Image (cartoon, grey):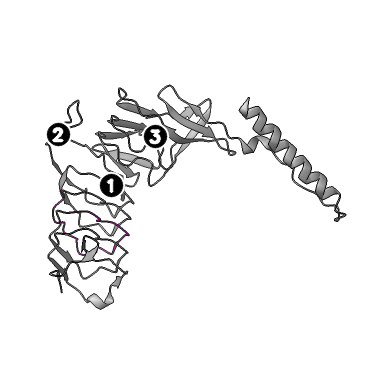
């Protein structure tokens, strides 16, 4: 009943507007008909509680997911009702408690920065070998060319009990050939204690390691270029940071709340690096007084 009432009101308003325009005496001109249905995109669900809708281009966008206390796996299919599934929108498979595995179909070509983050029990991603845009390497999501690490499963190699508790920690070596760590790729990966960067790494995106609270010091390779906004916020395990001579820029709040950093060294000319406001480590929101930067 409510939907009918809303549609009726929308039609009435448009009718009044068109009538008003006709009475103004304005020169006659050709107009594009208004598609009332486009105002009310109907969201549907798959059997796995994945919500989606059909775009005007005749493709499927995944837009949401209803978390379940029993479901541990979700599959993004190749097609739904004959339409190819091409997009996983921001926040669509986000912040779940029990999902451990997400399988991505062959037609997905766009995944939002926030689409797959903060899934507390996530163990692995699986991608159709026919997908031309993404692939999985040892359960970690990459672009097809393996140059960008898209998303690391939050609980990879971690055993979590039925109460959601664990004492496990883990380490991860990013494969050689990786050039970029995507925005939020390791977002809230609180079980990581060590991450090894490849010699090929050039860029770290926004919030890439946000709240990786147990992660220790990292080594930026020669050839590394830039660090995005909020990239290492709340990384309490960082104590010593050395930037290579190739570094070009560090964005705002890159090391905010990294309160245990004692020493930062620029191997090259610091004045040649573009340093955004408030890029430095902070403690309780304030600059760390005993921090040494050279």
In the image, 102 versus 290, the foreground residue is 290
Query: For numbered disc 2, what is the local secondary structure?
Result: loop
For this view, does 16 lie left or right of residue 292?
Answer: right
Q: Quadrant of residue 132?
A: top left
User: How far apart in space, not on screen, are marks 3 and 2 (Cα)?
Assistant: 36 Å
User: How far apart in space, not on screen, are marks 2 and 1 (Cα)?
Assistant: 18 Å
The mark closer to the camera, 2 or 1, is 2
The mark closer to the camera, 3 or 1, is 1
The segment highlighted magenta reads 214-236
Contact between marks 2 and 1 (CB within 8 A): the answer is: no
User: How far apart in space, not on screen, are marks 3 and 1 (Cα)?
Assistant: 28 Å
Q: Which mark is residue 187?
A: 1
Q: Which mark is residue 130?
A: 3
**Is residue 290 part of the magenta span, yes or no?**
no
Q: In this figure, which residue is indicated by the disc labeled 2?
A: 166
Q: Residues within 10 Å of mark 2 (few under 14, many from 20)?
A: few
**Is residue 220 part of the magenta span, yes or no?**
yes
- Tell me the residue at 34%/47% (across/down): 145
Q: Quadrant of residue 57?
A: top right
Q: Residues within 10 Å of mark 1 (few under 14, many from 20)?
A: many
Place of residue 73 in the rendered image (x, y in percent of width and height, measured from the top left)? 32, 27
Contact between marks 3 and 2 (CB within 8 A): the answer is: no
Place of residue 83 in the rendered image (x, y in percent of width and height, measured from the top left)? 53, 30
Q: Main secondary structure of the magenta part?
A: loop
- The answer to which of marks 3 and 2 sits earlier in the sequence is 3
For this view, does 211 lie left or right of residue 27?
Answer: left
């Amino acid at each position: 009943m409510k939907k009918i009432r809303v549609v009726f009101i929308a039609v009435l308003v448009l009718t009044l507007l068109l009538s008003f325009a006709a009475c103004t005496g304005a020169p006659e001109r050709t107009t594009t008909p208004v598609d009332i249905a486009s105002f009310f995109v109907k969201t549907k669900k798959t059997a796995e509680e994945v919500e989606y809708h059909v775009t005007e281009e005749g493709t499927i966008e995944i837009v949401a997911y209803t978390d379940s206390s029993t479901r541990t796996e979700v599959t993004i299919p190749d097609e739904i009702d004959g339409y190819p599934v091409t997009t996983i929108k921001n926040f669509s498979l986000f912040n779940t408690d029990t999902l451990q595995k997400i399988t991505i179909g062959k037609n997905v070509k766009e995944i939002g920065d926030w689409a797959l983050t903060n899934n507390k029990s996530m163990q692995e991603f699986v991608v159709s070998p026919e997908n031309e845009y993404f692939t999985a390497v040892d359960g970690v999501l990459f672009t097809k060319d393996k140059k960008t690490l898209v998303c690391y499963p939050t609980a990879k190699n971690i055993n979590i009990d039925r109460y959601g508790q664990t004492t496990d920690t883990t380490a991860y070596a990013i494969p050689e050939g990786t050039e970029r760590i995507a925005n939020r790729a390791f977002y809230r990966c609180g079980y990581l204690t060590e991450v090894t960067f490849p010699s090929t790494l050039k860029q770290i995106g926004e919030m890439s390691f946000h709240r990786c609270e147990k992660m220790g010091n990292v080594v930026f390779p020669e050839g590394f270029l830039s660090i995005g906004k909020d990239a290492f916020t709340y990384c309490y395990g960082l104590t010593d940071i050395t930037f290579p001579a190739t570094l070009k820029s560090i964005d705002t709040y890159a090391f905010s709340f990294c309160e245990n950093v004692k020493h930062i060294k620029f191997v090259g000319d610091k004045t040649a690096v573009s340093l955004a406001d408030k890029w430095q480590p902070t403690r309780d929101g304030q600059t760390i007084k005993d921090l040494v930067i050279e």
